[in-house]
Amino acid sequence: APAHGRPPKSAEVGRGVVDAMSFAPSIGGHPGLLRSSGGLDEQRSLQSSASFLDAFDFTAIEEMDPSLAEGHRVVYDREVPFELRVQDADIGPQEVGTLEAIRCKILALGDEQCPRHCRIELTSENDLFFHYTHSVDEHGFRDMQEQQKLMIDFPDYVSVVIKMLNSCIKEPHSYLAVFVMQRDGNARLDFIQNMEYKFVELLACNFQASPEEVVRQQITFRYNSVKSRLALMQGRLQDINALVKVKSPALLLQLHKAPPRAGSRR
């Protein structure tokens, strides 16, 4: 059942997701580590190995994101505390919602200083089928500008939204992000400032529940992304084991004998 009393998503989205998942290829094949003779050579080998083990390159994984298919670039990608509310047509929105960390991804198309299009995607780790999109260009922004009496222009829109999202993270008691969902798939994100004596609405963005095909593509990408990252991590762990085995076999033996931390048992 959908979490937090959200509008129900079609069960058709769930079917076929597993079938659509193309399993990510295993990533590895790192060159073996050679034992060096001499203290200086050994130190250099350790330093080069350490630098080799430090860098993770997720570029190839991130480029598979279906959100980038139309040429957009990601300018913001963070989890932000949202208050989620459900609105019924007859009753109105809930008085009190549920607090949840929602991943906000902002994508821009065109020049960095003067983008042609902006898209905001909202997803949740607690509900794979939670996917809402806000899409606006300069023409659509003029309507927002007139309705909300905004004092900013479209080139500043992305930076203003980013600033508000960051304020909700840094000052959650002063800045609120309230996401109101309707049963028909429409939703609205309200940025509200708590002035102690009153609440001031700063900005409102209209969202739409994403189509089933988009949701399916996003779930597939997220699955493959996690699988590929896990493969990279496992490959790196094998490299570290090989390095420790060569440089300090006794330490590796001690690590293998060490009992797991109590905090890791859940």
Image (cartoon, grey):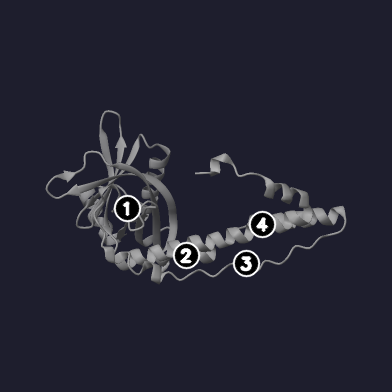
| Gap between marks 2 and 3 measured at Cα | 16 Å
Location of mark 4 (residue): 53
Q: Earlier in the sequence, mark 2 or mark 3?
A: 3
The three-letter amino acid code for the residue at tag 4 is: Leu
* Residue 228 sits above or below residue 266 on the image: below
**Which one is in front, 107 or 153?**
107
Pointer 4 with pointer 1, Cβ within 8 A: no
Which numbered tag is attached to residue 224? 2
The three-letter amino acid code for the residue at tag 2 is: Asn
Residue furthest right as drawn: 38
Crowding near pointer 4: few (<14 within 10 Å), some, many (20+)? some
Residue furthest left as drawn: 90
**Where, by quadrant of the figure, is residue 115 drawn?**
bottom left
Looking at the image, can residue 112 be seen?
no
Pointer 1 with pointer 3, Cβ within 8 A: no
Residue 83, image x, y percentages:
31, 43
Which numbered tag is attached to residue 153? 1
